[in-house]
Amino acid sequence: MRTKTKSKIIKAGVGLAALAAAGSYFLYGKKNAKNREVIAGWTLKMKGEVLDKMETIKELNEDNYYKAVDAVAARYKKLKKVSATELKHMVKELKGGWEHIKKQVK
């Protein structure tokens, strides 16, 4: 393997490790219990709102489910306490749950 390639791989690994460390500090550091509560609070509320929207959908299919998730996410996008990155991950998680939901619907 070439030296430049090795160097790039090492830098990428160090960068990922730094991100992971920052994330774990943000969520699990001694002084950051409040951050965990804020993140958990809005994510649980968002999931609940998606469930509420699902109850109003006449024909529950993938397209309508994704529209419901997007509609709820649009509201959370306006909140100051929700970062764009966190919201993106939550939307991905919720949309990823469609496969499980689909099995329950049938």
Image: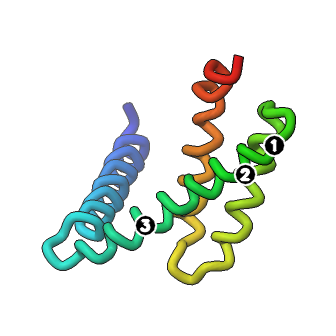
Please state which of residues 23 and 55 is positioned toward the viewer in this rendering. 55
Mark 3 vs 2, N-terminal side: 3
**Quarter of the image holding residue 49?**
bottom right
Q: How far apart are marks 3 and 1 (CA)?
A: 25 Å
Please state which of residues 44 and 58 is positioned toward the viewer in this rendering. 58
**Label at residue 57:** 1
* Image point (31%, 56%), residue name: 20
User: Is there CB contact under 8 Å for labels 2 and 1?
Assistant: yes
Q: Distance between the residues labelled 3 and 2?
A: 19 Å
The x and y percentages for residue 76 are: 64, 70
**Residue at the extreme bottom of the image, as rendered:** 80
Q: How crowded is mark 1: few (under 14 residues within 10 Å), some or many (20 or more)?
A: few
**Label at residue 53:** 2
Q: Mark 3 points at which residue?
A: 41
The x and y percentages for residue 99 are: 63, 26
SS type, badge 2: helix
Q: Which amino acid does label 2 sit on?
A: Lys
The x and y percentages for residue 56 are: 78, 47
The x and y percentages for residue 66 are: 76, 44
Q: In this view, does 17 lie to the left or right of 89?
A: left
User: Is there CB contact under 8 Å for labels 3 and 2?
Assistant: no
Mark 3 vs 1, N-terminal side: 3
Q: How many labels does the image show?
A: 3
Image quarter of the N terminus: top left
SS type, badge 1: loop
**Label at residue 24:** none
* Image point (36%, 58%), residue name: 15
* Image point (39%, 37%), residue name: 2
Q: How crowded is mark 2: few (under 14 residues within 10 Å), some or many (20 or more)?
A: some
* Image point (36%, 53%), residue name: 16
SS type, badge 3: helix
